Amino acid sequence: MKRLPVIVAVSLAVAFALSACAVSGSTPTASGDSTSLAGSSITVYNAQHEELTQAWADAFTAQTGVTVTLRNGDDSELSNQLVAEGAASPADVFLTENSPAMSLVENAGLFADVDASTLAQVPGDYRPSTAKWTGIAARSTVLVYNPSLLTEGDLPASLSDLADPAWKGRWAASPGGADFQAIVSAYLDLKGSDQTLAWLEAMKSNYVDYKGNSTVMKAVNAGQVPAGVIYHYYWAIDQAGTKENSGNTKLYYFKNQDPGAFVSISGGGVLASSKKQAAAQAFLAFITGAAGQTILQTGASYEYPVASDVTPNPALPPLDTLDAPTIDPSTLNSTEVTDLMTQAGLI
């Protein structure tokens, strides 16, 4: 999980204030009268951006009187903690940045069904077919490149092309992070185990290792490496600020339903073990409702809203122009991804 810069946090606070004013007086719950929830509390295991989820929590509390306590961590840490805790977990809601962590908890049988009215707010492309959790936001895979080192004609047609020896030492990634592992999970879903392992083994020979997507982008910006695989919002946040770490770069979208065009769905789910189902379901309904998605749209995380017909920040290309591959997020297999990446010597 990434902390946002101070300027981003300030922007989120402003967005929260505007959104809270905009939705004042509305009822955000999907499962009952919000006034009946006043005075209750829920615990959210949060692997989303802390400032964004805090803005969601503050707005939800202002409308319902429900206190929200956040326990922050990353996708892998919190999903594995939930599986270890099982029915004894104190968590009521789980939020992630990527789908594989949601699938891990879902496959352990730990999620309650999401309220139908909440699911109705989210188009089918942005939630799993199982309805055990729902998409709350999205981020797109991109290739960030330095145009002083690569021309448009040099760019790969597919993520798979980065396995070619011609790309040895010319692209960077952060394979230890949940973001990159989600991209590999999409590759696995689309190409199968054998092709994925072959690609990962070629990656081991070709790529330059950095810790964190921001560091990858900074290295490309500084000309240390010509290109890197990251998510779009790292670049968008920096472009909206000083451009200090992206001013010498451009983004390339693979499109053509390539694995490199993967759109990763951030997830939200209610734990079946929660004793506060109404408040937990109401929080998920709020996040995917117009108020919650507007906080995402007008904030500074630059992720994509996916629900309630809320459009993305105008600085982003629309989701339907990215030509992403169609993948059921509930099928993404984080365990096999970890095994294959370990076998390839990447983690």
Image (cartoon, grey):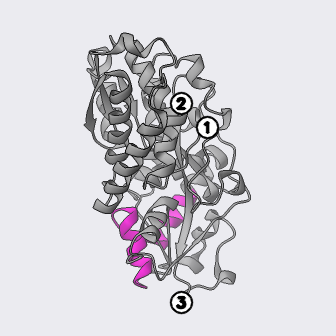
Compared with 296, 150 (above or below) is below
Mark 3 and mark 2: Cα distance apart in space: 41 Å
Residue 212 coordinates in the image, percent (x, y) = 36, 62
Is the C terminus in the top left, top right, bottom left or bottom right quadrant?
bottom left
Count up the numbered dots: 3
Mark 1 and mark 2: Cα distance apart in space: 7 Å
Q: Residues within 10 Å of mark 2 (few under 14, many from 20)?
A: many
Q: Residues within 10 Å of mark 1 (few under 14, many from 20)?
A: many
Q: Are marks 1 and 2 in contact (CB under 8 Å)?
A: yes
Q: Which is nearer the eye, 29 or 213?
A: 29
Type of amino acid under label 3: Ser
What residue sits right under mark 2 in the picture?
134
What residue appears at the point 48 percent right and 59 percent down from the top-left corner?
233
What residue appears at the point 37 percent right and 22 percent down from the top-left corner?
64
What residue sits right under mark 3 in the picture?
148
Q: Is residue 116 magenta?
A: no
Residue 67 coordinates in the image, percent (x, y) = 27, 25
What residue appears at the point 56 percent right and 32 percent down from the top-left corner?
330
Residue 251 coordinates in the image, percent (x, y) = 57, 71
Residue 62 in which image quadrant: top left
What residue sits right under mark 1 in the picture?
126
